[in-house]
Image (cartoon, rainbow, N blue to C red):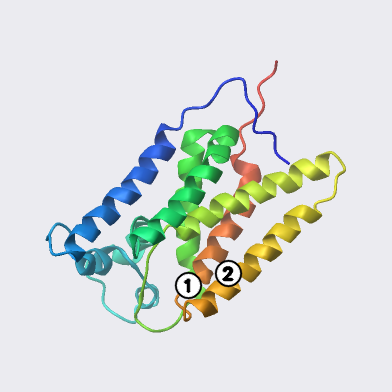
Amino acid sequence: MINMQSSVTPPMRALWTLTLVLFAIEALLQLNDIGLSVLSRRIAYTYGAFWRPLVFAEVEPVFALQPFTMFISHAFLHGSILHVVMNAVILLSVGRLIVTICGEARMLALFVLSAIAGGAGFALFGPQELVPMVGASGAVFGFMGAWKRWEVIALRSTGRSTAPVWKFIASLTVLNVALHFGLGGTLAWQAHLGGALAGWVLAPLLRAPRRPA
C-alpha cells in the first residue's frame, strides 16, 4: 500500500475547486429542470457533451472546435445530482492521494488527460447512435488507475504480492459489467476503460521526485 502519511498536508484548493465547479454546473442544470431557465440541459449537452459521430465527421458540429473541446467539456456535465455526487465522492477521496503524491498541477493534468482518454475510449468502442456521453467518470477512473499503478510499484519494490491490486481491478470490472446491464446499457464503460488506462500509463510519469532529506 502507498504511504499517505506526510508531515505537511498539501493544499487541496484545486481539488475542492474542481469538485465545486462540477456541482455548480449541475446545480444550474437542475434549476432549469424545475422550470427556472438558468442553463438549459439541452443546450449544455448540445455544445458540451461527447458526441461520438463528431469524431468521425458523420454529423456537422455546432461550432468548429466542438470535435476537440468535447473531449474535455463532457467531463464537466452530468446527468443528475446522484451522478455528480458519485463522481465527486471518488474524486475527493482518491484525489487527495493524487495531490499528496504528485501535487495539484499534476493532479489537474491527470484529470484533463484522463477525461480526454475517456472520450477516446467512448469514440473507439461506444455505440454508433447519436447519443450524448457526459460525466467525469473517465477522469475519476484515471485517478483510480494511477492509484493502483502506484500501489503495484510500491508492492513490487518491497517484494510483496500485487494480488490485492488485481483483485480490486477484477472486482471493479465485474461491478462495471453488472451496472452496464443493470442500467440498460447506458453506463459508459468505454470512458471508464479509457480513463483507467490513461491513469495507469501516466502514473510513473506524474509522481513527483523525492526530495533529499
Question: Can residue 64 be seen in this snapshot?
Answer: no
Cα–Cα gap, marks 1 and 2 = 8 Å
Badge 1 element: loop
Q: Is residue 63 left or right of residue 203?
A: left
Question: Which residue is pictured at 36% across the width and 39% down the height?
Answer: 17
Instruction: Give, as a three-letter code, the residue at label 1.
Output: Leu
Question: Can residue 7 be seen in this snapshot?
Answer: yes
Q: Is residue 134 left or right of residue 6?
A: left
Question: Which residue is pictured at 34% across the width and 74% down the height?
Answer: 54
Give 179 or 99, whichever is nearer the viewer: 179
The residue at the far top in this view is 213
Give 83 or 161, whichever is nearer the viewer: 83
Question: Which residue is pictured at 32% across the width and 66% down the height?
Answer: 49
- State the image coordinates of residue 87 (x, y, percent, origin top left): 45, 55
Quarter of the C terminus within the rendering:
top right
The residue at the far bottom in this view is 129
Q: Which residue is mark 1?
A: 187
Quarter of the N terminus within the rendering:
top right
Image height of 98 relative to 10, above or below: below
Q: Are marks 1 and 2 in contact (CB under 8 Å)?
A: yes
Q: Which residue is mark 2?
A: 176
Label 1 crowding class (10 Å Cα cut-off): few <14, some 14-19, many 20+? some
Mark 1 or mark 2: whose residue is earlier in sequence: 2
- State the image coordinates of residue 173 (x, y, percent, origin top left): 64, 67
Instruction: Give, as a three-letter code, the residue at label 2.
Output: Asn
